[in-house]
Image (cartoon, grey):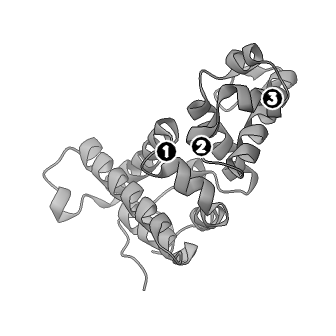
Amino acid sequence: MTIQDDGARVDPRVLRTRRLLQDALLSLARERSLDEISVADVADRAPVNRSTFYQHYPDTDTLLADALDAQAALVGADLNDVHPGTGTGEPPDVLVRYATHVAENVGLYRSALGEHGSPVAVARLRRRIGALALEGLELHGAPPALAALPLPIAAAALAGSVIGVLVAWLERDPLPPAQDVASWAWSAVSGWPAQD
């Protein structure tokens, strides 16, 4: 048995099946847009049957969100490992690794976070960034434009702004350097000024 972050035990066979499904979806996403990928496509590529898919995931959006999280964790870019308030105004290495990972998989992230992207992936990212923003606001206080808002609302506003910055960055061609977007995002959630 393997123990998850929440302390629950998970059978290694379950983890193996989930990895197969995640890898199948990511493989398909390199070939076509996410909205063209069905549960049947993922099950065929995995290869598992559709009922096995549904034993692990309610839909392809949740599968995509898990696959993106797993890929980020593999490259040491789990946003749960970022904490504002320590060090200098430079973004932490894990945030730079995350931005680099996104840049290296720009097509997938453009699709996942874009106009017709994955609501589950966007919601997870917003939740993580909101938690970072709240931690930063608690340490440094709110910027003047958000000072009248309750901290959780100000954190949500910052998270939405960071998501907007990330999506706008992904829409640029050529894509600005990953270090730039990491710096912009870090400035928004930590209270440190952006570095030039």
Between the residue at mark 1 and the residue at mark 3, the CA separation in whole angstroms equals 22 Å
As drawn, the residue found furthest toward the bottom would be: 196
The first of marks 3 and 2 along the sequence is 2
The first of marks 1 and 3 along the sequence is 3
Local crowd at mark 1 within 10 Å, few (<14), some, or many (≥20)?
Answer: some
Q: Is residue 142 left or right of residue 176?
A: left
The numbered dot on residue 117 is: 1
> Which image quarter holds the C terminus?
bottom left
Q: Amino acid at mark 3?
A: Asp
Q: Is any atom of residue 96 visible in this view? A: yes
Mark 1 vs 3: CB contact within 8 A:
no
SS at circle 3:
helix
Q: Is residue 47 left or right of residue 55?
A: right
Q: Position of residue 13 (x, y in %)?
A: 87, 22
Q: Give the residue at mark 2.
A: 34
Q: Amino acid at mark 1?
A: Gly
Q: Give the residue at mark 3.
A: 44
Local crowd at mark 3 within 10 Å, few (<14), some, or many (≥20)?
Answer: some
Q: Position of residue 193 (x, y in %)?
A: 36, 75
In the depicted view, which residue is nearer to us: 22 or 178?
22
Between the residue at mark 2 and the residue at mark 1, the CA separation in whole angstroms equals 8 Å
- The residue sitting at 57% across, 52% down in the picture is 79
Q: Amino acid at mark 2?
A: Leu
